[in-house]
Image: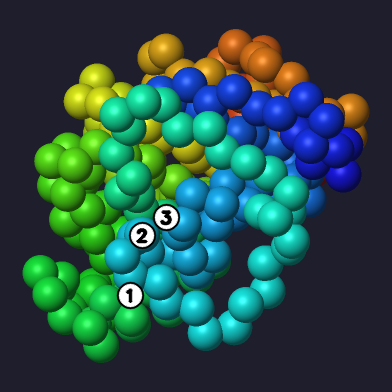
Amino acid sequence: MAPVAQLLRDGLELSELTILVGENGAGKSTIIEAIAIAYGLSAEGGSTSARPSRRPTESALHERIRLVRGIGRSRWGYFLRAETMHGLLTFLEENPGEDLPYHERSHGQAFNELLETKLIHLTRRGGLLVLDEPEAGLSFLSQVKLANQLGQLREEGVQVLMATHSPILTAIPGARIVELDEDGLHHRTWSELMTVSLYRRFLDDPGYFGLD
């Protein structure tokens, strides 16, 4: 993958809020996962103090990158990813603390409640929040709410790294947006993103995509 090769060659400077976007298979989740593991987080999600790992399938990219942490930065962090959410919620229910019976909620409700619970810790401790395609299962309004929460986290000193397909989540003011494609990594503005152009085209004319 060209984005992974460029990462290894040139590195990637993260801002207080960095968003990776791109097509499936472009390397977003691979890079997100590698950074999370290098930071000390489980590939299956959770915090730096809780590491559920039941079926390791991650790449070895995390072994080839080195993270540089700013002076005075908190070492605490949390990783939420859509594809392993069920397993993480099961782990939290089996190891109860302040956590709720998440499996009694819908996917979107469970995600919102989990995130709000962990936001309390993040705002107290600082650190790094890593999100991989958090829009899965979230309604339009829930995505807007999440975008506002992430923007507020940045203002409160929490560093956020996210991979997403959502034009809503990429619209957070001040975010550093990096688009991944077959040529590598590219810094973009929101209006330059391919996903934004495609959504606009679809909403204007679904028939363009064959939905007659």
**Disc 3 to disc 2, C-alpha distance:** 9 Å
x and y, in percent, of residue 7 in the image? 76, 34
Amino acid identity at mark 3: Phe
Asked which quadrant contains residue 73, the reply is top left
Residue beneath label 2, please? Answer: 48
Q: Residue 104 location in percent, x, y? A: 22, 80
Q: Left or right of 210: which side holds 55?
A: left
* Residue 38 visible at all: yes
**What residue sits right under mark 3 in the picture?**
79
Kindly identify which residue carries mark 1. Answer: 89
Using a 10 Å C-alpha cutoff, classify the residue at mark 1 as few (fewer than 14 neighbours), some (14 to 19) or many (20 or more). many
Which marked residue is nearer to the observer: mark 1 or mark 3? 3
Amino acid found under the numbered disc labelled 2? Thr
Q: Secondary structure at mark 1?
A: helix
CA gap between label 1 and label 2 equals 16 Å
Amino acid residing under circle 1: Leu
- Residue at horizontal 29%, vertical 29%? 72
Nearest the viewer among 85 and 8 is 8
Q: Is residue 3 above or below residue 91?
A: above
Upstream in sequence: badge 1 or badge 2: 2
Outermost bottom residue:
94
